[in-house]
Image (tube, rainbow, N blue to C red):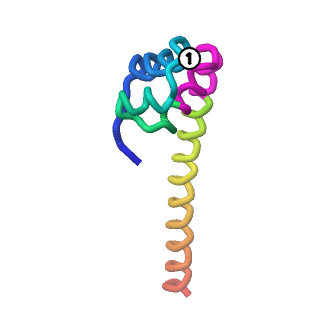
Amino acid sequence: MSDKRYTEEFKIAAVKQVTERGHPVSEVAERLGVSIHSIYAWVKRYETPPAERAAADAKDDELRRLKAELKRVTEERDILKKAAVYFAKTSG
């Protein structure tokens, strides 16, 4: 997977070439140096109204934040379990 990041404007311009001008996805992808999969994903993303897209982005951000927090709390719990076992052995 490429680690290239494209601006919002770049993505919208690419989508417009497909949706408004009628250029084939494969041609746009080749011309811009982007994968066909990326173009299709951008078309799917930008065909939804901006308000819905913003709501979906907010949900995605919240989900990402909650997953990170769950990972951190799980690691803390595991450390505490190991510490409890260690101290139970040394005190008993």
Side (left or right) of 63 relative to 14:
right
Task: Give the answer, above or below, for where 49 lies relative to 92.
Answer: above
Residue 44 in magenta stretch: yes
- Residue 12: x percent and y percent? 47, 18
**Above or below — where is 39 with respect to 78?**
above
Q: Position of residue 55 (x, y in %)?
A: 63, 22
Q: Is residue 92 visible?
A: yes
Q: What residue appears at the point 37 percent right and 44 percent down from the top-left corner?
A: 2
Q: Is residue 72 magenta?
A: no
Q: Nearer the viewer, residue 33 or 61?
A: 33
Instruction: Tell me the element at label 1.
Output: helix
What segment carries the magenta color? 40-58
Q: Position of residue 40 (x, y in %)?
A: 55, 32
Q: Is residue 54 visible?
A: no
Residue at the image point whose x is 52% and y is 28% from the top: 42
Q: Residues within 10 Å of mark 1 (few under 14, many from 20)?
A: some
Is 41 situated above or below 46? below
Left or right, 77 with respect to 9, comes to right
Of residue 37 and residue 6, the one placed in the foreground of this image is: 37
Q: Amino acid at mark 1?
A: Thr
Which residue position holds label 1?
Answer: 19
